[in-house]
Image: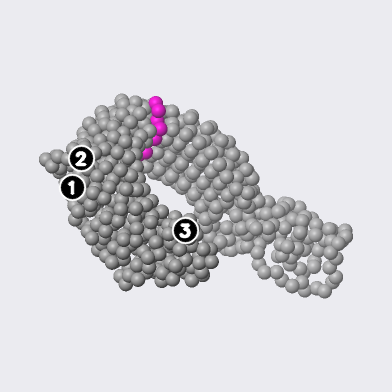
Amino acid sequence: MPTLVNHCGKDELYNESSFCGNSMVNVDVFGSPCKRARISAPFVLWGQEFEQEKRSSIDVLPDECLFEIFRRMPGQERSISACVSKHWLTLLTGIRRSDMCDNDTVMVSEDRELDGCLTRSVEGKKATDIRLAAIAVGTAARGGLGKLSIRGSNGVTNSGLSAIARGCPSLKSLSLWNVSSIGDEGLFEIANECHMLEKLDLCQCPSITNKGLIAIAENCPNLTTLSIESCPNIGNDSMQAIGQGCPKLESISIKDCPLVGDQGVASLLSSPSSVLGKVKLQKLNISDFSLAVIGHYGKSLTSLTLSSLKNVSEKGFWVMGNAQGLKTLVSLSISSCLGVTDLGLEAIGKGCSNLKHISLRNCCFMSNIGLLEFSKSSESLESMHLEDCNRITLSGVMAALSNCSLKLRSLSLVKCMGLKDMPFQEAIIYPCMTLRCLSVKNCPAVGSVSLSILGKMCPNLKQVDLSGLYGITDEGILSLLETSFAGIVKLNLSGCINLSDESVVAVARFHGETIKTLNLDGCRKITDTSLFAIANSCSLLNDLDVSNSAVTDSGIAALSCSEQLNLQILSISGCVRISNKSLPFLIQLGKSLVGLNLQHCSSLSSSSVDMLVGNLWRCDILC
């Protein structure tokens, strides 16, 4: 190495700071400690002698000679050499694995490269070609680069990605987000050098076209996961190449790519060797034909997501269900597809006999009839999520619960405006004994009568989320709590502004021995009475949120004096009645706390907050 750094014969080693004009800063390369010079000749810090000395120690040898020297070095020494100058770093990134000499030292380095154990992520201004070049050289001697993520940068070009390709043949995962300056040339290099690539994620890459993705398909047969989003120049040709050249592809996600149509989707699904298990199609110009292909050829599919497909009609979903090719489908998510009607939903229920999870969002033409017919066929269903499905009413939900009573464990109803109180009829109640999780969120017309009915239908609830139901009262909560015999573990009542201490006292009385998480954020009528009940009865409670309520210092004191309570997370954000008097009580609680939210507690002085931060150094405090 001394002769490389100073060819004139002076036996010196320079560290990177010696080369002020060409030194590398903040790069991912390895540099050994600086050695003391072994000669005592004077060192000139100015004038032409210094310029000549600096230039002669780096740039006199032709690039061809330096290349031959570098390719014979072990991996760690190549990494050290990259610290000398940008020129040397550039030369080092041009050395492919095939160019390295076949000696024992190099072979050991290459074996480590094949491990691909390192992960690097560069973003914004830190993402440059020089940075990528340093990563390419530096990671080779330390296990090899396996995962690389580049996000939001205009400083990375094809040159930087090419350096990664040549220096990191072990690369298995590549993610490019919002990188407009990288195009097909960079992907060509990745395809030619990184044959072990398994995951490729492209988002907002307008310069990448079909040509780049076709190169990946032809040279990376191990590709298992492909995600493409907002890439306007990627279309059907590349999808066809992926379908033919990547027999191990298990997951594909395509979103907002206007050139991808029916032909591309059909090419991916209809391949005889296809093992696709997970498919996401969002905001694409595909028609009923694509859904028919999915229904017929998706024999290995286990997860399917369809979102914002404006050109798909009722016929497409009907054919997809009746094609009988989705017997292995386990999870189905459909969002903002006008083609989802009662007829289509019924066909899906009959054709997807092993379906366990379904999510339907913004399906405005689906009604109780479709939900009922679907529930009759879905004997394996375990969870159902309905959001912005405004034609669904409480009677439809009750019918679905009655039919799905064998395995259904979770039901979520969000922003369903058709849900409202209805006259109670004991004769139509058929309990769903398996349901454990119930969420009814932001449904403004849901009142106490609805909760009473749901409570009788779901007697074994353990997790309940009623956030945003400002129409419910203590009476409705009491009816739900009284009929829940399994013991509620998690209860979210945030935003239920009409609830009072009576509800919390009931929680402590009926479920004090099981409740672990209780959220009362925004329940303005909650006072210290609730905290007294919690302190006396809820021995397992570890997460309590009483933000924006009427609790005071006395309530905090009650919590701190409880011998059985062992809170880990406490949120009192926006509780303006909590003052400096609570300081000793909060310190006492802090012995077990790992999280404390004090935001917008205007009666707590900054000095008190500082004292808490100093005393509760193990606790994460928001203030």
What residue is disc 2 on?
Answer: 398
Q: Nearer the viewer, mark 3 or mark 1?
A: 3
Disc 3 versus disc 1: distance between alpha carbons?
40 Å
Residue at x 45% of width, y 63% of height: 579
Query: In this view of the protein, which residue sits in the foreground, 173 or 606?
Result: 606
The residue type indicated by label 2 comes to: Met
The answer to whether residue 189 is seen in the rendering is: no
Query: In this view of the protein, which residue sits in the foreground, 606 or 287?
Result: 606
The residue type indicated by label 1 comes to: Lys
Mark toward the start of the polypeptide (2 vs 1): 2
Residue at x 63% of width, y 59% of height: 29
The residue type indicated by label 3 comes to: Cys
What residue is disc 3 on?
Answer: 601
SS at mark 1? helix
Q: Horizontally, is 317 left or right of 86 in the view?
A: left
Pointer 2: residues within 10 angstroms few (<14), some, or many (20+)? many
Residues drawn in magenta: 304-311
Can you say whether 116 is above or below 561 in the image?
Answer: above
Q: Give me the disc on residue 150.
A: none
Can you say whether 272 is above or below 491 in the image?
Answer: above
Q: Nearer the viewer, mark 2 or mark 1?
A: 1
SS at mark 3? loop
What residue is disc 1 on?
Answer: 456
Query: In this view of the protein, which residue sits in the foreground, 226 or 604?
Result: 604
Locate residue 309, reporting x and y percent.
40, 30
Residues under numbered marks 2 and 3 in contact, where contact means CB atoms less than 8 Å apart: no
Can you say whether 620 is above or below 351 in the image?
Answer: below
State which quarter of the image contains the N terminus: bottom right
Pointer 1: residues within 10 angstroms few (<14), some, or many (20+)? many
Residues under numbered marks 3 and 1 in contact, where contact means CB atoms less than 8 Å apart: no
